[in-house]
Image (spheres, rainbow, N blue to C red):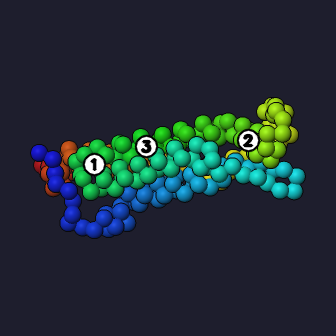
Amino acid sequence: MPEAVRTDRPLILDITEDRAALTGVFGCIAVIAGSALAWASVPLGFTTMTVAGLEANGKLTLVLGALALAFLVAALRLPGRDLSVLAALSSLGALAVAVAYWHDVRSASASVVSRLIENRGTLDPGAISARFAARPGIGLWVVMGGAAATALAAAALFVRGRATARWPAGSGGDEEEHHTP
């Protein structure tokens, strides 16, 4: 029989008193915030143009970060279920999207320059990338760091949940027996 929803303590206490939960929540917030920040910056003479995450694949990381946060909070409120695994998978999905964009960040150069000239000819992405090299923006780093932190925190919550399910507090399963002769 599954355990009931934990309502004996406020959720904020569960989060702030638990390092893994706090790390996971802050990681999810970082993924969500980083999704809207600059994912690429392209220097153009005296100015720099940026590509926001929501213009790129940030919509996916935003949804995955929100899902990870929902699963993480649910894992804290519904003990005995493996919802922390879903939080880890959601954050790893956000990490994969961010890493894939980081790997191909130079393609952002062509999109920035095409916005500047607004269909005034065809663009050769190779020539543009060589002249106007895009660099990863702060939002991309924030998403990757937050997603990694969330995945690690969710894994810690999962392992701890499995250990407490196997050896409940006071059962003696986590303590060594000492016999005196």
Nearest the eye: 130 or 88: 130
Q: Can see residue 35?
A: yes
Residue found 60% across the figure and 36% down from its top: 100
Pointer 2: residues within 10 angstroms few (<14), some, or many (20+)? some
Please tell me whether mark 2 or mark 3 is closer to you in this view. 2
Residue, disc 2:
111
Residue found 40% across the figure and 53% down from its top: 69
Quote the CA–CA distance across marks 3 and 1. 19 Å
Q: Return the disc, 3 or 1, that comes first in the chain's sequence.
A: 3
**Amino acid at dot 2:** Ser
Residue, disc 3:
90
Q: Position of residue 1 (x, y in %)?
A: 11, 45
Q: Looking at the image, is 42 positioned above or below residue 9?
A: above
Residue occupying the far right of the picture: 45
Q: Return the disc, 2 or 3, that comes first in the chain's sequence.
A: 3
Q: Return the disc, 1 or 2, that comes first in the chain's sequence.
A: 2
Quote the CA–CA distance across marks 1 and 2. 46 Å
Please tell me whether mark 3 or mark 1 is closer to you in this view. 3
Nearest the eye: 85 or 62: 62
Helix, strand or loop for disc 1: helix
Residue, disc 1:
161
Q: Can see residue 178?
A: no
Pointer 3: residues within 10 angstroms few (<14), some, or many (20+)? many
Helix, strand or loop for disc 2: helix
Please tell me whether mark 1 or mark 2 is closer to you in this view. 2
Pointer 1: residues within 10 angstroms few (<14), some, or many (20+)? some
**Amino acid at dot 3:** Ser
Quote the CA–CA distance across marks 2 and 3. 28 Å
Residue found 62% across the figure and 44% down from its top: 56
Q: Is residue 170 left or right of residue 91?
A: left
